[in-house]
Amino acid sequence: MMTTELYVVRHGKTMFNALQRAQGWCDTPLTSKGSEDIHYLGLGLREMHFVEAVSSDSGRAIETMRLIMGENLQLPKPPYAIDNRIREWCWGSLEGGYDTEMWGVLPRVLNFKTSEQMWETDITFKDIAEAVYEADTAHWAETFDVLCSRVFSGFEDIAHRVEKNGGGRAIVVSHGFTIAFLLNLIDAKQPVRVDLQNGSVTRLTYEEGKFTIQEIGSTEFIEKGREISKDILA
């Protein structure tokens, strides 16, 4: 049996990413630069053989997967599925507001004077989830327990399915905070992070019901694809 490995990609840069607005369950399309970088990512991954492709149900994730698979040389293409469990956190009534507004509200809910003061502490995903839930006047946000169950089961079901079918690589397109949260669910030492770049690849292996983190937020495939593109155009 081959090793079971997930290549977990953060979607390409979107309009709201560029405008620095909170984007969880709300959705905006990829920018031209976002599409370009994912095109390079696809080129960098084009010789990889994937046994399965899965994205969240957000349009930005679906478009990212379409661009990646459009460059892949594998024939036939791997089966593709959409799973809403691997979508981004819902920011509730904070959705669509500027990031500075959201990260201004949440520290106050947690009794910090500033966001800088909050980030200087060992803030946890549970703290943030509970703050979002409390601040959400629309009552759309999920509880921490619901988030744990949704996110982990979504990724584990993909890995378990691949393992059951003999192993191999699956490519999965998800979202920045969700990927960071998954890393923390796998390894509690992994910090709250908001630094995973659009188009970055986080590699996980899965064996006998356990994930192991192999690499976090690599952009090497984008850089590889950029060089391939230069050679093609030369």
Image (cartoon, rainbow, N blue to C red):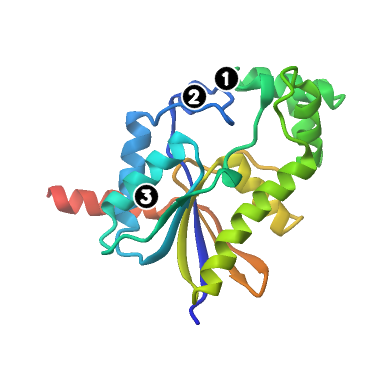
Question: What residue is rendered at 55% in x and 60% in y?
Answer: 158
On screen, residue 58 versus residue 146, left or right, reads left
On residue 222, which mark appears? 3
Residue 123 % position (x, y): 79, 39
Mark 1 surroundings within 10 Å by alpha-carbon count, few (fewer than 14), some (14 through 19), many (20 or more): many
How many numbered marks does the figure carry?
Answer: 3
- Give SS at disc 3: helix
Q: Tell me the mark number nearer the camera, choosing from 3 and 1.
A: 1
- Judged from this view, the residue extending furthest toward the bottom is 1
On screen, residue 115 versus residue 34, left or right, reads right
Question: What residue is rendered at 31% in x and 38% in y?
Answer: 36
**1 and 2 marks in contact (CB < 8 Å):** yes
Q: Amino acid at mark 1?
A: Gly
Q: Amino acid at mark 2?
A: Phe
Q: CA distance from mark 1 to mark 2?
A: 8 Å
Q: Earlier in the sequence, mark 1 or mark 2?
A: 2
**3 and 1 marks in contact (CB < 8 Å):** no
On residue 96, which mark appears? 1
Q: Nearer the viewer, residue 187 or 77?
A: 77
Residue 227 % position (x, y): 26, 52
On residue 16, which mark appears? 2
In the image, residue 53 sits, relative to residue 121, either above or below, namely below
Q: Tell me the mark number nearer the camera, choosing from 2 and 3.
A: 2
